[in-house]
Image (cartoon, rainbow, N blue to C red):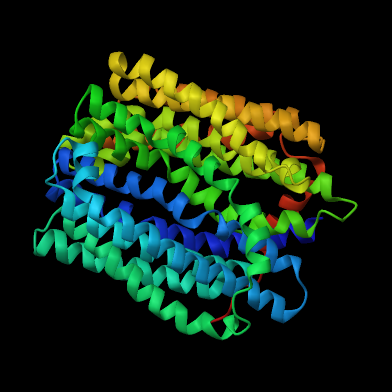
Amino acid sequence: MLRELKRLSKQTIIYGVGVILSRAIGFFLIPMYTHFLSPKDYGVLELVDLTGYILSYVLSMGIDQALIRFYHLYQDPRDKSSVLSTAVWFTVIWGGILVGALVPLAPFLSTLLFGTHEYSTILMVALASLFMGSVTGLQRAILRAQQRSVMFTAVALANTGISILLNILFVAVLHVGVLGIVYSGLISATLIGIYLWTRISPDLKAGPDRTKLRPMLRYGIPFVPGGIFAFVLNWSDRFFLRLYSSIAAVGLYGLGYKFGMIVVMLVSVPFTFVWGAYMFEIQSLPTARRTYARVATYFMLGLCAVGLVISVFGRELIVVMADKAYWGAERVIPVVVLGMILMCSDNVFQVGLLLEGKSAYLSVAKGIAAAVNLALNLLLIPRFQTMGAAWATAIAFGVYAASIYYAAQRAYPIEYERVRLIKLGVCALAVFALASFVPTEPLRAAILKKSLILTLFPISLLVLRFPTSGESAYLTRAIRQRLTRPRPSG
């Protein structure tokens, strides 16, 4: 089992670099965005991005999820090629039809989202960018299915570099504002899409197969309502904030939420890229259930460790990276982090549902949580504004996590290491509570004191005997080998 876990960790790190690079563009550019864009502009960008997010699920129809599963289902290279070709041509044709129908509706969508048609051009460019993004997203899914992790990471690096340069050009040099950011996304997606097409086109020789499309859609479409419900859970609060507060409040909340999402970007997303295929590969092994449980513990450890660092240093991150007009965003970060940890737990707790082919329940669980979220948004946002939005999201994700866990255990029982998970949660909450008493000024002193307090997290885990005897022995041996390794001469 240790060998399999090492392999999973290695692949997660490789994909993690690629995912972090592709998702981190917004973080790299936060100082520039907050300098050249007002909170209202940032709120406009947030709402445009979220509109594209929900449309992307309808655009993909879950075909990217189906591609990974069906690619590994067949052994014949021609069948594998046919699966890839079917997915690509469906994405291009369906995406072209949908986006082509939506572009003329841009003025209506602008009025619906912002109360004015002045953002119509931004929305039209965003729709074109959405189409190209769906194509490149599927191309990256092909790289994942083929386990071409190095190319995946190289493409992510290139995309990040192109996007950063274009954003600097449009925002800082040409002062085009939000429209420039949207143009940047369209151009970078087009360039990356053209390159990836030259690399994967040899694998599409078999051509599309209608007989494969139907089962692929039957598997993938249930992910669509789940994605829409996920949108409600994660992003619907922005629209409530616009109704009950202002677009500027959306901008502040969106920035705070972005920092809270670091835990997803650093831990969950790269893990998911590997875990989605790996869990199916090992299901026939006699140690599969034990591996699922152990991976769940390690995954939650990673989530809590990263989430704790972000929560403790939330204010310092905002002060260092953002303009003073955005500093109020730091209040929501710890609550958002809690919600993200609960959300990401489904990666390891939904295993039973996926193995038993009951993925449709994921949409049911998200639907229940989405209904809870909408109710809490209506109840809390008018009174508590951004904090109400953050707590509504965290509570709703708690409902979602509990629902997934209960249903998956009924379908495919796994003996998760509950005692260790409880110890992990208690230690993380205790350290965060202690760090919250540290004065925020002066900045350097706050960073130093909080850093010292963070060291209590691993210490408390050791005191509570969180590591197993085997893990302790392995860590001790690894540290000893590291310390005694001879250094190269010269």
Q: Position of residue 287 (x, y in %)?
A: 87, 50
List the single residue furthest toward the right: 286
Q: How many marks?
A: 0
List the single residue furthest toward the left: 174
Q: Is residue 177 left or right of residue 318?
A: left
Q: Is residue 444 left or right of residue 222?
A: left
Residue at 52% x, 75% y: name it.
151
Residue at 41% x, 80% y: name it.
195
Residue at 32% x, 56% y: name it.
101
Q: Is residue 431 visible?
A: no
220 is higher (above) or lower (below) than 253: below
Instruction: Locate residue 374: give its quadrant.
Output: top left
Viewer-side residue, 170 vs 32 = 170
Instruction: Locate residue 207: give its quadrant.
Output: bottom right
Q: Position of residue 455 (x, y in %)?
A: 52, 37
Q: Position of residue 448 (x, y in %)?
A: 37, 37
Q: Position of residue 451 (x, y in %)?
A: 43, 37
Viewer-side residue, 91 vs 339 = 91
Q: Is residue 329 left or right of residue 58?
A: left
294 is higher (above) or lower (below) than 81: above
On-image quarter of the N terminus: bottom right
Residue at 28% x, 43% y: name it.
46
369 is higher (above) or lower (below) than 202: above
